[in-house]
Image (cartoon, helix red, strand yellow):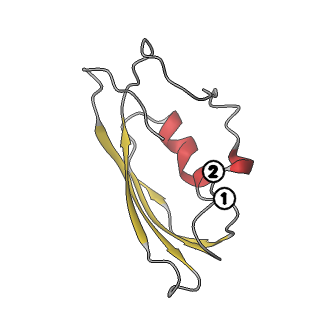
Amino acid sequence: AGVILSKDSGLRPAGVMVFSFSPPAEHLPMRIRVLEAKPDTQAIQPGVIYSSTEIPYHSMWADDKIWMPTLLATSNSFFQGHFAFSSGPGAHSKLLNHNWQPY
């Protein structure tokens, strides 16, 4: 998925996450950088846009409900964390442990 950015988007780093999965031999760890930007509301964007109170966390990866509310509610926030999952990547995988930390 992607977002169309305006020319003055102010793209900035907002977080760093590491994901690991069990068993580790089947899925390599992933390192993700989260970027925050002002979306271009004039561009045609496919998909559905949710308000911050209607985000469907129940159908997303389990870690999203941990870090996303802070990102959406706090300007210039930054966070990092390691998220360990019970199986391969996806919304079906159970979150076993995390050390998420906002700054």
Residue 94, image x, y percentages: 69, 69
Residue under the point 42% across and 32% down: 3
Residue 69, picture quadrant: top right
Amino acid of disc 1: Ala
| Mark-to-mark CA distance, 2 and 1 | 12 Å
Q: Is residue 42 above or below residue 51?
A: above
Q: Answer few, some or many: residues within 10 Å of disc 1's Cα (few below 14, many 20 plus, some between 14 and 19).
A: some
Q: Is residue 41 above or below residue 66?
A: above
Q: Position of residue 16 (x, y in %)?
A: 37, 58
The residue at the far top in this view is 42
Q: Specify the amino acid type for callout 2.
A: Lys
SS category of the residue bearing label 2: helix
Where is mark 1, residue-wise? 91
* Residue occupying the point 29% across, 39% down: 12
- 22 with respect to 76 (left or right): right
Residue 99 image position (x, y, % from top left) = 51, 69
* Residue count near mark 2 (Cα–Cα under 10 Å), binned few <14, some 14–19, many ≥20: some
- Residue 25 shows which numbered tag? none
- Residue 78 percent coordinates (x, y): 38, 48
- The disc placed on residue 65 is 2
